[in-house]
Amino acid sequence: GAVVSQHPSWVICKSGTSVKIECRSLDFQATTMFWYRQFPKQSLMLMATSNEGSKATYEQGVEKDKFLINHASLTLSTLTVTSAHPEDSSFYICSARSTGATNEKLFFGSGTQLSVL
Amino acid sequence: GNSVTQMEGPVTLSEEAFLTINCTYTATGYPSLFWYVQYPGEGLQLLLKATKADDKGSNKGFEATYRKETTSFHLEKGSVQVSDSAVYFCALSPTLSGTYKYIFGTGTRLKVLA
């Protein structure tokens, strides 16, 4: 089946630094990718929708200048957490929708656990 | 607004035990409902789905029935195996066309002991 590779799987960084998370679709072209965040004991929450070649659409309450999303190709989207702070520590997961897929044909990465010290 | 509530885990069962993971939802209209499973070190994978009331989704021995009257989509399996140990997410997708904005529950970790 289709595979989405997310890297890194975990990262620890100092407060004030930036962290980049990559999401790649390995065997299909993804016109749309989604970025989710999950705090402990809470639901996976959609942060933003990323469309190849255009600006991402952010959900209400998500700071677009803090969470930079780039979807420059049909197989790669990146999420950069800029000037990370401890409150940004969370589990981040991406998903990708293949071209022409129906609503339920989403493929997920394995997630990135971010810890900001 | 739309939301999904699922039972907190972890759920620990012995092999061959019966499994139920409760999931209830709040939504306007008629959403599609899903169960996703995440095995250790892997991404979420679609386990089963139901797109309308009274539909039953099933896969790998797991079943869930879309109950509109109780706004529920409980996951069941008659006899769990150690290999079923994973995190299970209930999710809904709103009925608006062209949207893929899933609403997820918190996930329920299942541990099956040999």
Image: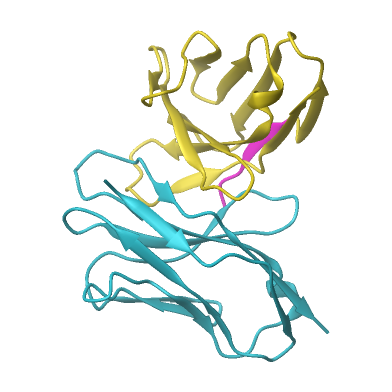
Residue A33 visible in the current orientation = no
Residue B6 located left or right of residue A113: left
Q: Is residue A65 depicted above or below B29 in this figure?
A: above
A50 versus B87 height, above or below: above
Determine the residue located farthest toward the front in the rendered image: A87
Please identify which colour was used for chain A in the image.
yellow
Q: Within the magenta stretch, is there residue A49? A: no
Question: Does the magenta portion include A6?
Answer: yes
Q: Colour of chain B?
A: cyan
- Across and down, in percent, residue A95 comes to 51, 38
Image spot of residue A34 (x, y percent): 47, 32
Q: Residue at x 64, y 45 (%)?
A: A40
Of the 4 image quadrants, the one containing the C terminus of chain B is bottom right
Query: Residue, x 63% and y 16% (percent of image)?
Result: A81
Residue A3: % across, % down: 61, 44
Q: Is residue B68 visible?
A: yes
Which residue is at the far left? B29
In-image side of A55 versus B6 (left or right):
left
> Relative to residue A76, is residue A70 depicted above or below?
above
Residue B70, image x, y percentages: 27, 75
Specify start and end residues of the magenta stretch as a single range: A1-7
Q: How many marks?
A: 0
> Would residue B10 appear left or right of B58 to someone viewing this image?
right
Specify how the rendered protein is coloured. by chain
Q: Residue at x 19, y 53 (%)?
A: B28
Image-based side of B50 in relation to A107, left or right:
left
